[in-house]
Amino acid sequence: MGFFKVAGSRLYSAGLALLGRRIDPEGWYSASGGFEIGDGPVEYRDLVKWGYYNAWGRACINLLANGVSSLPWTVRGREDKVKDKSPLMAILGQPSEDIGSLPIIKSVMQHLLIGGEAYLLQKGPGEESPNRGKPTRLWVFPAYEVAVTPNAKSYGDILGFKRGTETYAPEEMTQIKLFNPMSPIGGVSPIEADFYAFMANTIIMKWYAGLLVNGARPSAQLIGQSPGGPSQTAKKAAEEYVRALMAGAENAGKVTAPPPGFEVKAMGLGPMDLGLTEMEESSRLRIFAANGVPPETVGDHKHATYSNYEEAGQRLYQDTIIPYAVTIAAVLNKWLAPRFGEDRLTIDMANIPALQEDKDALAERFSKYVKSSIMTPNEAREGLGLDLVGAEGDELLTDMRTVPLKQVAGEPQIGTTAPKESTE
């Protein structure tokens, strides 16, 4: 693929051309043209077919999407105070006044993990309406539905968005993406990062299914019987026979009548001999690694690398779910939140259930600091995300157990002289 001029910038054209995505004559960049994977382009539908329709891939995507959308999202307004009701939370799809899963954020996560990009479109009434111009609804679109044109004067900025025949300004639509070293405006999903692991895992399972359907017999090969070798016509017939009836996972183990002049010879190699079991396990682990998911959190306990499920859950949140959430919150607070005044979207880290054990350990450590007069009660409460208790919480406390017993009893301390009794 050659280099294109995109908005007059060779830098952008080089990156986009190497990425293998479609650029139309007007300079629009689109993910619908396919992704460059290894030695060739892969269409978006292939990412869905081999990634999301893979059992382990789907489990990872749903686990992460549910985890991010179900975090204790909150809205803070003026003076950093938490707001019980906010139109910002409502537009993200909060089902009730209580903190719950946000459908918009879940959809964003699903598209990010499949295509590496997600797009948000906001529409609402004008400034003259009772809502004062605040948007009332958000739509989420996958990468293949939206094209963008880059800003040649500003690295990584987007001048506009296009979906179908409609064009939108950056104020109306925004992009959330995962890092792509080949393009400042394109994303790379976990499926793209290790596409062959997803594909291999699915094909191996199809191979196993083919063995079961076809009597669990290993595949065979064709051996020519003619002394002088088969004719060209016979060779072509044999090649077609192999392609149609012997090649591929769906034909694994199938036994059929050979074409004239050939005999079927069993390979004598089963799945264990071919190393399929090890390959399936290896590809499964690569899928987990690409998504940043500990194996036991999606049901694969054989390859558990943590001492218990609770610890694995903590690592999942700390290493994967929370970083994804922070990325999404940063985009929303820059693009959407200003339309709602001083409101901004935050995550109540102190109330994440999976991290509760860490919170207990932190509370115990702060408690020791307070008892040792290293930290005031209010400093400890602030570190735990709790409300302050007032002026008395700003005083250092003294543990009575650290005070000398003689001082508590009123007796003189070592090195001092007891006061003389008055003789008057």
Image: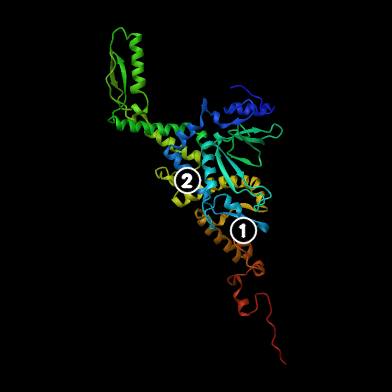
Amino acid at circle 2: Leu
Q: Earlier in the sequence, mark 1 or mark 2?
A: 2
Q: Quadrant of residue 15?
A: top right
Q: Secondary structure at mark 2?
A: helix
- Alpha-carbon distance for marks 1 and 2? 28 Å
Question: In the drawing, what numbered circle is on residue 63?
Answer: 2
Amino acid at circle 1: Val
Q: What residue appears at the point 47 percent right and 51 percent down from the top-left corner? A: 311
Foreground pick, 290 / 302: 290
The residue lying furthest to the bottom in this view is 424
Residue 385 in view, yes or no: yes
Q: Quadrant location of the C terminus?
A: bottom right
Mark 1 — residue? 82
The residue mark sitting in front, 1 or 2, is: 1
Place of residue 230 in the rendered image (x, y in percent of width and height, measured from the top left): 32, 10
Place of residue 296 in the rendered image (x, y in percent of width and height, measured from the top left): 43, 46
Q: What residue appears at the point 68 percent right and 77 percent down from the top-left corner? A: 416
Q: Secondary structure at mark 1?
A: strand
Foreground pick, 74 / 164: 164
Q: Is residue 370 above or below residue 63?
A: below
Crowd rating for badge 1 (residues with CA inside 10 Å; few <14, some 14–19, many 20+) = some
